[in-house]
Amino acid sequence: MGDGSALLVGVARVLFGGTRKWFSILWIVAFWVAVNLTSSAIYDLAQAGFQWRQLLGLALFAVVWGLVREVGRAVNEVTVLKRDSPPCQVLVVFLSPPLDLAAIHAIPSGSLTDATLEAFQQSPWRMPMVAIRHHLGQLAKVVVVPTRDSKGKQDGTYRLVEEFRATVKRFTATAPRIPVVVAAGELPGNKAAGIWATGVALEDAVEWLAALRHVFACLHAEGYRDSDIMVDVTGASKAATVAGAAVTVGGFRRLQYVNRVDYSVLSFDLNYGEESA
């Protein structure tokens, strides 16, 4: 579902309690019919004075005014529902530098046990490993969204995608379902894929949002639904976190976060009004 239709459906759900798309669209059409009748009645009143046939349109004026106020409230109200993260088929992660690759290479290969995760210590790659373990069994794909080089530096995490892919493979080889790790620029089904091959600008929220929309478009083309996808913002920059929240508002999109204190995985549903996934 596109951003615009998600907004309209979300507003209709708030106003009328509809949970089906056709129900929401029906009310949106009815709303615009009411607007047209009201404007026609006001025009006739100004041109020819009061006539009985204007009563319906004038009566709808109060209804339209009330709906406009409610729409404004619904559009500006976003609810956040926190819950334990449900298993997903696709996990989208933001790639941070690991700090000490040699220490990660020294961890014995195997499954993602508590001892293995402890061996990552304070490495930023510990959090995505926790997130991956949380979804193992149902997880089919991990989509990595890396950063681009800063001006005059070679610090983009797109250079570390192969290392991250190999690390995930080392610790999921015995899983009942081994997830495939792909970078955002490697996803099929979108002609714009190449522009993300060298990552995303670290603090450009607009570019992060475009990259995430690209990821969702590609995953939809592969047959995944919004409810199959989870965006993990644990390793994201502030700009990427903003984009992650923006792209998951409404519909059945979700984001999650790994608590850095106890390493629990929490999911957040951000929806318009009282909508819940």
Image (cartoon, rainbow, N blue to C red):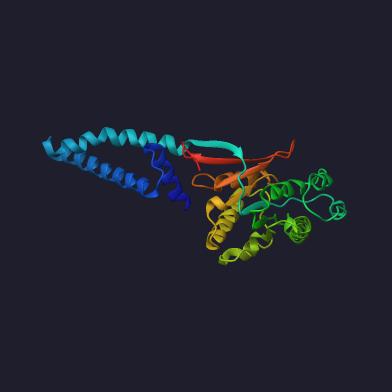
Task: Name the residue at the front extreme.
Answer: 176
Percent position of residue 66, x then y: 33, 33
Report the number of discs. 0
Query: What's the residue at 30%, 37% (across, down)?
Result: 64
Percent position of residue 273, x then y: 46, 36
Percent position of residue 209, x then y: 58, 51
Tell me: residue 138, above or below residue 118. below
Relative to 78, 158 lies left or right: right
Relative to 54, 210 lies left or right: right
Query: What's the residue at 41%, 41% (across, down)?
Result: 13
Quadrant housing residue 28 = top left
Tell me: residue 58, above or below residue 222. above
Query: What's the residue at 56%, 61% (across, down)?
Result: 218
Tell me: residue 120, above or below residue 184. above
- Residues 86 and 153: in front is 86
- Residues 158 and 101: in front is 101
Percent position of residue 67, x then y: 34, 36
Query: What's the residue at 15%, 40% (across, down)?
Result: 47
- Residues 271 and 36: in front is 271
Relative to 67, 103 lies left or right: right
